[in-house]
Image: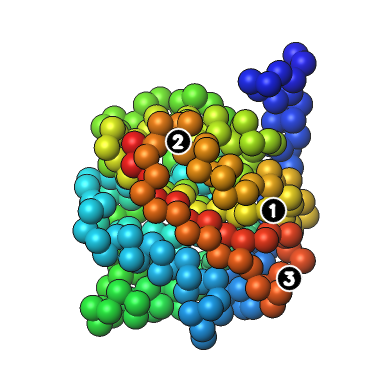
Amino acid sequence: AGATAAAPRHETLAALREGYQHFDPRAYLQNNYLPPRADFSSEEFVVPWKLRCLAETFASGEIHGRTLIDVGSGPTIYQLLSACDHFEEIVATDYLAVNREELGRWVRGEPGTFDWSPFIQHVCKIEGRGEPWQEKERRLRDRLSRILPIDVHRPDPLGAPLRPPADALLSAFCLEAVSPDRAAFARALAHVGSLLRPGGHALLLGALGESFYLAGAARLPVVPLAEDDVRTALTGAGFALRDFRSYAMPPALRTGVDDVDGVFFAHAQK
Ligand SMILES: C[S@@+](CC[C@H](N)C(=O)[O-])C[C@H]1O[C@@H](n2cnc3c(N)ncnc32)[C@H](O)[C@@H]1O
Ligand SMILES: O=S(=O)(c1ccc2c(c1)CN[C@@H](CF)C2)N1CCSCC1
């Protein structure tokens, strides 16, 4: 079928899906979650900025409930470190079995998994409660109870409605990295919004101005977003914007693994 304003050509989505068959979780983790990007030495670097956005938002106490769903978790858990104190159940999701398996190995504490302790230690430090990082790690492992397949291009991304719907939704660097264009990004956001209860909170983190990224043999296309594209997609998906912040990627963190210009953090309510 030909491309229409409403939907991209099926081949475009098929090409994206094929590209993700070459996604290497360990290469992805190395590219983004080890130095130089995993630099905690200055508040000016992206990791402290991003973790602070999440810690401050959850510290308000406004966002809590039974279930938080993380859309497109990939092989990462850093994005859940502040959330896990405020929800009894964390549901991680990803399109690829290799990522779901990587997450499962971390949850079970198996040897050889990625060392998230620098991230956990930093979050405990900025949360300022003097919590031993091993306790935070244990709590997330205990609460990360489901790791499900997801496809955000489906109106029902999990294949069936989440019952009960999630009280909160989090997604980091997923929607723009799996959408061929802005319309598909906006549709994917509406699809995942259906997993959230009315009045539920959505926390989105993502890339600004990015057109590709590398993950081992995979070179994945990304729809380059401007801040207003994110705002427009959120309001179009029925969300009320509560907070929006952005961060310009410094030259030292432009390492060739992608062409990201900046990072956005959006807090919205359904
Ligand atoms: C750039 S990674 C983001 C990973 C992680 N959330 C982070 O913060 O680094 C994008 C993720 O989206 C997943 N993905 C690919 N296609 C998808 C789809 N159609 N629906 C949902 N997730 C998808 C990939 O497997 C990958 O784990
Ligand atoms: O901003 S990051 O450097 C980062 C983290 C992940 C990604 C990108 C950037 C850009 N490319 C994305 C591809 F989708 C994935 N960062 C890595 C350390 S923790 C905070 C987030």
Q: Could you tell which of marks 3 and 1 lies nearer the N-terminus?
A: 1
> In which quadrant will I find the C terminus?
top left
Q: Is residue 121 visible?
A: yes
Question: What residue would you read off at disc 2?
Answer: 235
Label 2 and label 3: CA atoms lie apart by: 33 Å
Residue 194 sits above or below residue 88 on the image: above
Could you tell me residue 193's position as x and y percent?
41, 34
Q: Helix, strand or loop at disc 2?
A: helix
- Cβ of mark 1 under 8 Å from ligand 2: the answer is yes
Read off the residue under disc 1.
210
Nearest-to-viewer mark from 1 and 2 = 2
Q: Quadrant of residue 249?
A: bottom right
Say above or below: 139 vs 39: above
Colouring chosen for the image of the structure = rainbow
Q: Nearer the viewer, mark 2 or mark 3?
A: 2
Q: Quadrant of the N terminus?
A: top right
Name the disc covering residue 255, or none. 3
Q: Residue at x 68, y 53 (%)?
A: 209
